[in-house]
Image (cartoon, grey):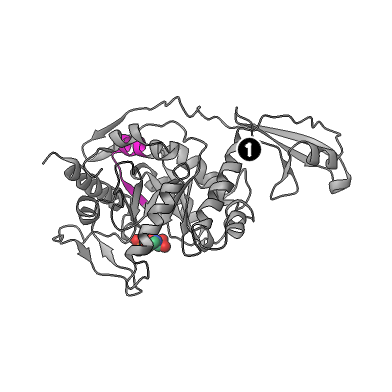
């Protein structure tokens, strides 16, 4: 698959989100993921908006962000989702789940963050075993079916809270209000209750309709390159599907993920092709004809502009090791490079992101070029 173009792979891949991502990559001429490792929500939103045009994936670590707003409608997740639609990128929460199945399900879907609601992609550290993968797959399937939930609520103003919540599939939300199911048309009600809480009644209902395109009707706008500047003009909304990446190899020095471990990750992926999109790895792990996994690789930096590139760049002194985009994409066969400090710490992150995008895209083109 190393020689196959992203467009050809998109046509064959079964996972709806991988299909969307591969088409997005062709459209934006980008195989760049920004690792937005900043420590405030304000900086995160600022970066996502500024760098959005250059990337296809925005990677977050929500637990290192101060001031994360958990409101499902107006909070940080919702703001990121809006920027993702505006610029055309997917949100990848680099949570590296690593616990027993039951716990990872709750960490994925519950708590204040409700990761599943705003992150298209998450990843798993498979140390606890394959059950973590099936547990996350199960949680995602449940979430997905809720999205297609047929609205059968009969909640109106004045309905006693207990009846409204228990009989109508209305679930708790972060604040004191309650969220109804999201129907297939993207309509969702929020039920506001009176001060009496569960003993009281619904005092008002807010209806929000999110616009989204059916999964099967892609509506792409065109992308043009003007000189070196990428001019990007809109994209269909991503499908309401969730995807998982298995952490199969790490970039850090002396990590314990040996070849046998990596192979077990590949097997787990093959067993859950409806949910697993691919891997966080240092190379392509597609080895069988039927494998259509996507690979994203962290530990990537470029030498400063003008300096000779020889495949590696000095590490960060804390165990991180860096390879260059051309080595990772052209030689190791990864699909998407993940870059954090290489872009964020640059004097001009926006133009540095464009430099990474161009280099990674060129490496991909070199890879698929006929021998
Ligand atoms: N990351 C790695 N290596 C891995 C897996 N994940 O570096 O094997 C993540 C880190 C960080 C980002 O958690 O968010 O990728 C790399 O950031 P950097 O480019 O600033 O080194």
**Magenta stretch bounds:** 22-33
Can you tell which quarter of the image residue 317 is in?
Answer: bottom left
Tell whether position 56 is magenta.
Answer: no
Whole-percent x and y of residue 19?
Answer: 39, 36
For residue 274, side relative to residue 174 (left or right): left
User: What residue do we see at 29% from left, 38% from top?
Assistant: 6
From the viewer's perspective, tell me whether residue 226 is left or right of residue 12.
left
Secondary structure of residue under mark 1:
helix
Q: Quadrant of the N terminus?
A: top left
* Disc 1 within 8 angstroms of ligand 1 (CB): no
Classify the position of the C terminus by image quarter: top left
Is residue 151 among what the camera can see? yes
Please state the total of marks drawn on the protein image.
1
Find residue 154 and report its horizontal and vertical position in percent: 79, 29
On whether residue 24 falls in the magenta region, the answer is yes
Question: Which residue sits at x=59%, y=54%?
Answer: 105
Q: Nearer the viewer, residue 370 or 214?
A: 370
The spot of residue 212 in percent (x, y) is 52, 30
Q: Is residue 109 left or right of residue 34?
A: right
Q: Taking the image as four quarters, which one is ligand 1 found in?
A: bottom left
Tell me what residue is drawn at x 61 percent, y 42 percent.
142
Residue 345 seen in the figure: no
**Disc 1 target residue:** 146
Nearest the eye: 234 or 142:
142
Q: Is residue 319 above or below residue 138?
A: below
Disc 1 residue crowd, few under 14, some 14–19, many 20+, Cα 10 Å: some
Work out which residue is located at the far left of the displayed protein and give it: 371
Residue sitting nearer the eye, 240 or 267: 267
User: Residue 352: image x %, image y %?
Assistant: 28, 53
């Amino acid at each position: 698959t190393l020689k196959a173009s992203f467009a050809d792979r998109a046509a064959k891949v079964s996972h709806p989100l991988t299909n969307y991502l591969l088409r997005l990559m062709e459209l934006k001429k980008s195989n760049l993921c920004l690792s937005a490792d900043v420590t405030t929500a304000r900086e995160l939103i600022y970066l996502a908006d500024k760098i959005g045009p250059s990337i296809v994936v925005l990677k977050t670590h929500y637990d290192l962000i101060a001031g994360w707003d958990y409101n499902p409608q107006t909070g940080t997740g919702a703001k990121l989702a809006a920027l993702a639609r505006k610029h055309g990128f997917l949100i990848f929460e680099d949570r590296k789940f690593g616990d027993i199945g039951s716990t990872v399900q709750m960490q994925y879907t519950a708590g204040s963050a409700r990761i599943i609601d705003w992150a298209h992609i998450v990843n798993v550290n498979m140390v606890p075993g394959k059950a973590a993968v099936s547990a996350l797959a199960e949680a995602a399937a449940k979430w997905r079916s809720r999205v297609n939930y047929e609205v059968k609520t009969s909640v109106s103003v004045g309905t006693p809270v207990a009846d409204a919540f228990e009989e109508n599939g209305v679930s708790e939300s972060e604040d004191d209000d309650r969220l109804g199911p999201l129907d297939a048309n993207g309509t969702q009600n929020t039920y506001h209750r009176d001060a009496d809480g569960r003993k009281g009644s619904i005092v008002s209902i807010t209806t929000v309709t999110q616009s989204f395109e059916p999964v099967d009707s892609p509506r792409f706008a065109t992308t043009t390159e003007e000189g070196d500047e990428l001019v990007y003009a809109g994209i269909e909304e991503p499908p309401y599907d969730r995807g998982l990446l298995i952490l199969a190899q790490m970039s850090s020095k002396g990590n314990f993920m040996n070849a046998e471990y990596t192979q077990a990750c590949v097997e787990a992926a093959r067993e859950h092709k409806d949910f697993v999109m691919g891997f966080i790895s240092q190379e392509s792990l597609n080895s069988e004809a039927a494998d259509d996994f996507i690979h994203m690789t962290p530990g990537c930096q470029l030498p400063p502009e003008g300096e000779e590139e020889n495949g590696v760049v000095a590490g960060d002194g804390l165990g991180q090791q860096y390879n260059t985009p051309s080595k990772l994409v052209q030689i190791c066969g990864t699909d998407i490079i993940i870059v954090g400090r290489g872009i964020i710490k640059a004097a001009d992150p926006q133009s540095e992101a464009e430099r990474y995008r161009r280099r990674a895209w060129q490496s991909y083109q070199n890879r698929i070029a006929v021998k």
